[in-house]
Image (spheres, rainbow, N blue to C red):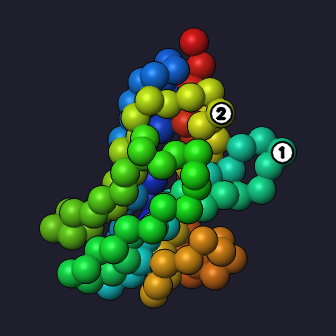
Amino acid sequence: QVQLAESGGGLVQPGGSLRLSCTASGFTLDYYAIGWFRQAPGKEREGVSCISSGDTSTVYDYADSVKGRFTISRDNAKNTVYLHMNSLKPEDTAVYYCAARWFCSDYANSYDYWGQGTQVTVSS
């Protein structure tokens, strides 16, 4: 059974950091592009970043608001993709999801597999 599971969310103060993990089971993550999305209350799901499959691991940053603060990376040996989030702001508060498809895209509906999401709350 193909599954993605996010972890690492939580409550953090403004300016703090978190590292989110997206771990796959039932398939090899290396064969897929993995995107991170987020959805804040009352807002549409927003593409954050994506890392392509295979050796190239090309990174696509979709959200201007996180450029320079968030970094995506993958560890194929652990079948895991990470989202490193630094200098967090209250407006980063959202449920963060990872998703898989063959090629990177910022169109959420094009992804084949989704995790259940992890809550990130940035507040003092």
Residue 38: image location, x then y, percent: 62, 52
Q: How many labels does the image show?
A: 2
Instruction: Give the residue type at disc 1.
Output: Gly
> Which residue position is annotated with label 2?
91
At a point 63% along the width and 81% down the height, the residue shown is 110
Q: In this view, does 64 lie above or below 74?
A: above
Q: Residue at x 38, y 68 (%)?
A: 59
19 vs 107: above or below:
above
> Of all residues shown, which one is farthest toward the right?
42
State whether residue 42 appears in this view.
yes
Q: In this view, does 113 lie to the left or right of 83?
A: right
Kindly identify the amino acid type of the residue bearing the numbered disc 2.
Glu
Residue at figure coordinates x 58%, y 45% from the top left: 65
How far across and how far down the image is residue 14, in percent?
A: 52, 20
Q: Which mark sits nearer the N-terminus, 1 or 2?
A: 1
Residue 94 is left or right of residue 103, and the answer is right
Q: Is residue 95 above or below residue 5?
A: above
Other residues around mark 1 within 10 Å, as few (<14) / some (14–19) / many (≥20)? few
The percent coordinates of residue 80 (x first, y second) are 30, 62
Quarter of the image with the N terminus is bottom left
Does residue 32 appear left or right of residue 40 in this picture? left
The residue carrying mark 1 is 42
Badge 2 local density, few (<14 within 10 Å), some, or many (20+)? few
Closest to the observer, 73 or 120? 73
Q: Does 73 sit left or right of 122 as displayed?
A: left
- Residue 7 appears anywhere in the view: no
